[in-house]
Image (tube, grey):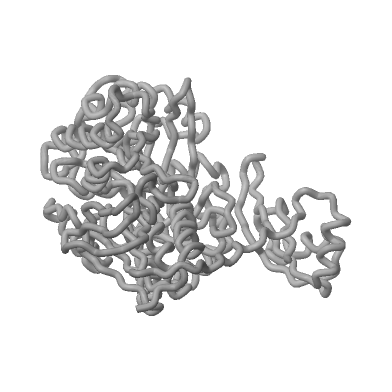
């Protein structure tokens, strides 16, 4: 057991040693009685003064730790959460190795946990390796030649490999710490462990992902790229095989972790009798500002000379049953061309580890609800996304150029004629257009109503030169592949829908955790696979 002392607020300039001393003081301990280290750190400007906020981890003899916890009534002094308990191994024999479909964070961590426990999983990925993805995405940026199988959405690492590599999550699951430890072991920067809002950066995350895959292979797992799953087979309600572009792969258990953009597979699953549900998601634009504007709005007089990192923001405004909010904020980043289907424009954002670009960007997204669609089609939200992407493609003039509009012009109802201080970073070119023609009226209305409030939260955010690039549609999956209390898809015993694409996660860490939970379910039932 260890003790976490949180909420230690000190002047920004003070060194870590001051935080460790304060943690011991609050616990009534001398320096020699407990080892201490910084556990998490952040900074705070909410009260007009720049402070660092620390959480410190203390480790002492168990008897002394127990006395401290009994004596201290401070809610900021608590025992560290216990690590995830080891999963018991089942007794049933596996006739075939477990299959994991999808090489994003859910699939990678499911496969890694299985591999570490001797199950030697078979990991199937429709796209290519990261080396191939880099070539394919570079070719797309430069020429507009889209590979529909290997792109920013599909391939080793999933969509998250070409993002900011943000590891922040709202879930409180001990598996988060385990996932973070695996990422650190595979090359994530050491400071990632201490940051309250950790990020890796696209440039470094790709190396981490490849290291995870190599670890799976070294432990007896197998990874097959360019192996697109097209459906499944069953007998008497039990999974018997995965249908792929290369033929049938017999299996009795599988983790389905395909990400939010596998539209062809969602359509196939609906035709095969899987229970699918609509779920809420969001659509909107990528908003770009000068990073200097965000720094000034967030840091004020501390924006220069204090060595602070590029500023981030998280904004939200709600009216009725919808919200407009920022999503996937990328300090010092760029807007990326994220299409995975021909004839559609999709935007996303990324930043490198240094976050040293001229612009900041984030999705400004508005809620889309299941009840927005008539009829019973569970894929209605998916078709809605696709139509918006096709409209954006047409407005951009083809070639995957994106429609853009200054916020001030959108507000005044006119097409922009020139850029202001903010120049676009979207790589396939842009075309001035009326974004009202790309997005539903309720989305535009919410954006325009929310912006003044966002400007109050972050001064300068609602400046006329803020640039909106359309469209952002892949915030999350519009579909949930239902799984029962036993984790299996109803009527498909042995098949576990998992991760963001199946509707059970929303980011790298939560997807990784859901992947580990899926692996644990397999391990509860079966013993490790043997030839």
Rendered-image quadrant of the C terminus: bottom left
Q: Give whichever of 317, 491 is nearer the camera.
A: 491
- Image quadrant in which you'd find residue 439: top left
In this orientation, does residue 152 appear? no
Across and down, in percent, residue 366 comes to 38, 30
Q: Quadrant of residue 22?
A: bottom right
Q: How many marks do you count on the picture?
A: 0
At a point 34% along the width and 22% down the height, the residue shown is: 442
Q: Position of residue 319 (x, y in %)?
A: 47, 22
Camera-side residue: 471 or 521?
521
Of 325 and 130, which appears nearest the observer? 130
Identify the residue shown where x is 30% and y is 38%.
473
| Residue at 18% in and 60% down | 136
Q: Which x, y percent locates residue 409?
A: 28, 25
Quadrant including the N terminus: bottom right
Q: Nearer the viewer, residue 52 or 326?
A: 326
- Residue displayed at 75% across by 55% down: 78
Classify residue 39 as left or right of residue 351.
Answer: right
Residue 395 visible at all? yes
The answer to whether residue 167 is above or below residue 205 is above
Judged from this view, the residue extending furthest toward the front is 236
How far across and how far down the image is residue 298, in percent? Answer: 52, 42
Q: Is residue 489 above or below residue 513?
A: above
Asked if residue 133 is positioned above or below residue 437 in the image, the reply reads below
The image quadrant of residue 421 is top left
């Amino acid at each position: 057991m260890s003790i976490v002392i949180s909420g230690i607020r000190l002047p920004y300039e003070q060194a870590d040693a001051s935080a460790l001393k304060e943690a011991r003081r609050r616990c009534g301990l001398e320096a020699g009685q407990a080892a201490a280290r910084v556990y998490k750190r952040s900074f705070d400007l909410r009260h007009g003064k720049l402070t660092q906020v620390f959480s410190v981890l203390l480790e002492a003899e168990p008897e002394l730790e127990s006395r401290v916890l009994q004596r201290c009534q401070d809610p900021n002094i608590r025992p560290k959460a216990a690590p995830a308990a080891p999963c018991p191994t089942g007794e049933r024999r596996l006739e075939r190795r477990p299959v994991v479909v999808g090489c994003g964070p859910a699939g990678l961590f499911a496969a890694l946990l299985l591999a570490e426990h001797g199950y030697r999983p078979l990991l199937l990925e429709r796209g290519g390796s990261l080396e191939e993805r880099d070539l394919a995405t570079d070719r797309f940026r430069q020429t507009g030649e889209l590979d529909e199988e290997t792109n920013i959405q599909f391939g080793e690492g999933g969509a998250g490999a070409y993002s900011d590599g943000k590891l922040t999550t709202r879930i409180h699951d001990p598996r988060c710490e385990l996932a973070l430890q695996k990422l650190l072991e595979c090359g994530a920067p050491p400071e990632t462990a201490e940051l309250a809002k950790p990020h890796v950066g696209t440039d470094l995350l790709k190396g981490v992902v490849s290291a995870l895959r190599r670890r799976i292979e070294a432990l007896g797992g197998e990874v097959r790229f360019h192996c697109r799953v097209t459906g499944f087979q069953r007998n008497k309600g039990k999974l018997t095989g995965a249908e792929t572009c290369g033929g049938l792969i017999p299996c009795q258990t599988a983790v389905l972790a395909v990400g939010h953009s596998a539209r062809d597979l969602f359509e196939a699953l609906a035709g095969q009798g899987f229970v699918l549900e609509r779920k809420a998601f969001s659509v909107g634009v990528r908003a770009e500002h000068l990073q200097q504007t965000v720094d000034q709005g967030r840091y004020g007089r501390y924006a220069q000379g204090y060595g602070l990192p590029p500023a981030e923001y998280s904004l939200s405004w709600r009216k009725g049953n919808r919200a407009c909010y920022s999503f996937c904020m990328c300090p010092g980043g760029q807007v990326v061309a994220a299409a995975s289907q021909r004839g559609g424009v999709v935007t996303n954002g990324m930043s490198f580890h240094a976050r040293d670009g001229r612009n900041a960007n984030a999705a400004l997204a508005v809620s889309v609800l299941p009840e927005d669609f008539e009829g019973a089609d569970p894929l209605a939200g998916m078709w809605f996304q696709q139509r918006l992407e096709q409209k954006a493609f047409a407005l951009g003039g083809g070639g995957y150029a994106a429609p853009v509009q200054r916020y001030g012009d959108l507000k005044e109802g006119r097409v922009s004629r020139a850029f202001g201080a903010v120049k676009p970073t979207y790589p396939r070119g842009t075309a001035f257009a009326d974004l009202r023609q790309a997005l539903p009226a309720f989305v535009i209305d919410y954006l325009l109503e929310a912006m003044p409030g966002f400007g109050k939260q972050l001064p300068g955010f609602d400046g006329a030169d803020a640039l909106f690039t359309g469209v952002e549609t892949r915030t999350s999956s519009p579909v949930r592949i239902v799984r029962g209390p036993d984790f299996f898809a109803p009527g498909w015993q042995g098949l576990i829908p998992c991760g963001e694409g199946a509707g059970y996660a929303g980011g790298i860490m939560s997807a990784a955790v859901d992947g580990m939970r899926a692996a644990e379910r397999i391990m509860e039932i079966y013993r490790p696979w043997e030839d």
